[in-house]
Image: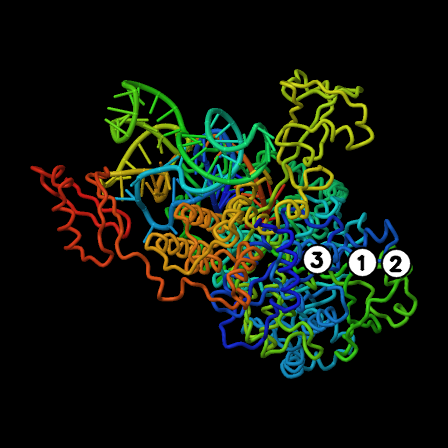
Amino acid sequence: MEYDFRKIEKERQKQWINNHAYRVSNTSAKPKYYVLDMFPYPSGAGLHVGHPLGYIASDIFSRFKRLKGYNVLHPMGYDAFGLPAEQYAIEHGVHPAISTAKNIDTFRKQMDNIGFSYDWEREVRTCEPEYYKWTQWIFLQLFNSFFNTNNQKAESIDSLIASFENVGNTLYPFPAAVNYQPSAFSASDWNSFNEKQQQEILMNYRLAFCGYGEVNWCEALGTVLANDEVVNGVSERGGHPVVKKKLRQWYLRITEYADRLLEGLESVEFSDSMKEMQTNWIGKSYGAEIDFAISGISTEGLSLKVYTTRPDTIFGVDFMVIAPEHELITMITTTEQKTAVDEYCAYVKSRSERERQAEKKISGCFTGAYAVNPFNDARIPIWISEYVLAGYGTGAIMAVPCGDDRDFKFAQYFNIPITNILGDAFNGTEANATKDAILHNSEFLNGIVMRDAIAIVNDRLENMGIGKSKVNFRMRDAAFSRQRYWGEPFPVQWENGTAYPLSETELPLLLPEVETYSPGPEGEGPLANIPEWVAKELETNTMPGYAGSSWYFLRYMDPQNNESFCDRKVSDYWNQVDLYIGGTEHAVGHLLYSRMWTKALCDLGHISFDEPFKKLLNQGMIQGSSRFVYRLKSTKEFISFGLILDFDSVDKLHVDVNIVDGFELDTHAFANWKPDYAGASFQLEDGKYICGSEVEKMSKSKFNTVNPDELVQKFGADTFRMYEMFLGPVEQSKPWDTKGIEGVHRFIKKLWRLFYDEMKGRVWNEQTPTADELKILHRAIKKTEDDTERFSFNTAVSGFMICVNELGDLKCNKRAILEPLLVLITPYAPHVCEELWGALGNENSILDASYPAFESKYVMESSKEYPVSINGKVRTNMSIALDATQEQVQEIVLTNATIQKWVEGKQLKKFIFVKGKMINLVI
RNA sequence: GCCUUGGUGGUGGAAUUGGUAGACACGCAGGACUUAAAAUCCUGUCUUCAGCAACGGAGGUGCGGGUUCGAUUCCCGCCUGAGGCACCA
């Protein structure tokens, strides 16, 4: 009897479906465990071998936890709204809903091939009204709430209004990032404001709000992008240029959550690099705001407010720099400098974001004005330069060339004299940013270490009423609207220029059909082309791709609920995602947004936890290993890699990795691959055509994708699953290489042969296992449990291989050994294990079995071989009982003949016990 | 430039808390079975020295130091790959 994986896998999968084997209940006496994959965007390209890596890992862990007796929630769905489907619609005229549904079908088929244990009855698609109704609902929650900075929590906007009516905004001043005038108002002020004014003020508090601001505008995509969607001045998707543009936009007030997003990192298990990426993105810095008086001209009462993290360097300030957009410029610029300043500001405006980032050349312009150092009355020239950003801090800095590299270069470039406050720590050729130097030239700070001077200066400034310590964040509020069609409509209606929320009963606000996907009359989204939509003054923007993905993990818990986004009892039961598996590319986008949404929903009392993901495991990226052929220029002759003398004389062309065996090209397949290559001739080395190779991102255009379907067809899903795990640690990125898959396939065949003999058929029996066999099994049980628990799936697979090899050597075929072995391997190779489990005569699914490691009858060995070394050199092995006391061990070792020979006549200095590993004598 | 994380045979990788480095697999070489192939199985495979052979000696985890009876693991200094951030004051 042969191992027929094609038949087995098909039958087992059918059985899983018919028996609803992976249906999960929201009530159970078992403890819960929630394993989540980052759901995919269903692109037209389908899955390649890189995608399933994380899915296989999460599937293994889910099955493992199930066998350990947990009620495991393991769902899957699709992040189905987004730009690519709409781009495709523009190019091919296919409705995004249709192409998306088609892509989802392909994804599903590919996933089913691999044999995942998802509860498909819980599938969600973010583009369906039943789902986005609740995305809109959560938007309304955010719209109708504000962030109470006193207790750092979101609260209903109604309590804010009540407070305004009583005491104005004294209890709740405007959020720090808001610059609204007047910044304070009394109760009677509030009550005298008309509706429009009141709404305008409230808009400055709402967690989801509409405002005008500089946004990243991408002309090619016809929409704005969030900061994390812009990479090096171009769009993440498509690489189109991005410019700053002032537009009316919706935002999420994520900046209010900055502190809690930072603190929350301490309570979750993310990798250090992930935590660091988020920490950097949030970018918290401690510093001080200082008001500098401006001298001369007609600028009485005017002051320049700067932000600095180093108030201790205040005696080293040699000039001020303000951003080109700074509002003071027109007021302080002297008549002599006006032309130069105007020219400079025009020059800065002409530069795109991309140019600014690409060439960081020093530029600037003197305003003619001077600020005054409050401690020594020194006159400090005020400059303008683009290296100071308008959006951060106060848009103005005090420049300390001896302590800051950028300031130093600027001073050098413009010949501004440099004051040294660092003594010998400053060498005159390079700034030194240390905080540990002793201050010089700093009057009352002389002789004090810089680090300690910070607080002293802050105190003085505060007493003088011209400064206060201040915390700043680099993170900006998140742009939340897109001028596109394929997204959630905002449940918002405009009236006299004021945005009003729809009521909950009007949800979902359905995405209407459109005739064209092109932008509206004034650059709005396609919805602006619909007369009825515009007549009702409905918002024409749609929500961005990350809206639906910011809360999908909650919907899985209760996907069919029509009354609520997720029943509170149900979310209390499933609680946090225990294990979240996905790539690092969402570090500062999705992961931050979903953390913020969770916190807001928690504050508003809709769920009971404020961090969505307890543990995050980042799978590495599987790269493609591309192959190249080399064509002599303007010929049809291809030259083998090793024979090329001059790379300028050849064209380097990608060749499909699937027609290359290792590095050797299948020349016949190549000639048939593309019409262009039909009459190709080859210059071979040793009778072979050898290709060049490079590791690149896996992509269709590079012909380096490997389709999992073909591997599953050839070797079976179990082999494929195990092989992806065997490749190496899941966290690690590595190029795909199929050549080792045979070894794993061989292992599964060996496993099969523990049960079946080709000639004799079934070979197992009911005899009692031998001690040796039990020892092998128990070692494997322990290893599997330990390795799987710490996500070391590759070493767990090695453990199976060792176990099966050793059992094969002993000709093991005892049921008492085989059954637990199968349970052990099931998470990794579910089809074949369940098939064999059934063959052993077990009626029930293996899902009902519990992990053998947890049954006390399996006792680990009672004694162990220890290596005994003398001065670190191993001299002999000794068998010692596990429960022996230290004294007993010492006696046994010292009376051993081999050891006595070595120790004889020498003095024993030390006797070292090493826990479960080895014993060492020092003489 | 800053931060994070790696560097181990021909290859992917293992070594969980400082305890016999190279598990497991690929590849390669040789052999068995076969008319032949496939499949399967066996042996060898870090370097080097010695040897008829069993056993054995020495070196070895990017480089150079240090701590320790003992270091792939800890500390210091360099080299280098990958990822992230980058005028954030």
In the image, residue A159 lies at what x, y percent?
Answer: 64, 81
Query: Mark on residue A483?
Result: 1
Question: In the rendered image, which quarter is residue A422 located in?
Answer: top left
Q: Which residue is mark 3?
A: A108
Give me the chain letter of mark 2.
A
Q: Nearer the viewer, residue A478 or A714?
A: A714
Q: Which residue is mark 2?
A: A520
Q: Relative to A614, does residue A275 appear above or below in the rendering?
A: above
Q: Is residue A419 visible?
A: no
| Quadrant into which the C terminus of chain A falls | top left
Query: Mark on residue A235?
Result: none
Q: Kindly identify the amino acid type of the residue bearing the numbered disc 1.
A: Gln
Question: Helix, strand, or loop for circle 2?
Answer: loop
1 and 2 marks in contact (CB < 8 Å): yes
In this picture, residue A223 sits left or right of residue A363: right
CA neighbours of label 3 inside 10 A, class few (<14), some (14 to 19), many (20+) = some
CA neighbours of label 2 inside 10 A, class few (<14), some (14 to 19), many (20+) = some
Give me the chain letter of mark 1.
A
Q: Which of marks 3 and 2 precedes in the sequence?
A: 3
Q: Residue at x 71, y 32 (%)?
A: A655
Q: Kindly identify the amino acid type of the residue bearing the numbered disc 3.
A: Arg
Q: Relative to A750, does residue A570 appear above or below in the rendering?
A: below
Q: Kindly identify the amino acid type of the residue bearing the numbered disc 2.
A: Gly
Residues flagged by tags 1 and 3 on a common chain: yes
In the image, residue A553 lies at what x, y percent?
Answer: 62, 66
CA neighbours of label 1 inside 10 A, class few (<14), some (14 to 19), many (20+) = many
Question: Helix, strand, or loop for circle 1?
Answer: loop
Q: Residue at x 88, y 55 (%)?
A: A518
In this picture, residue A100 sits left or right of residue A390: right
Between marks 2 and 3 in the image, the one whose residue lies nearer the viewer: 3
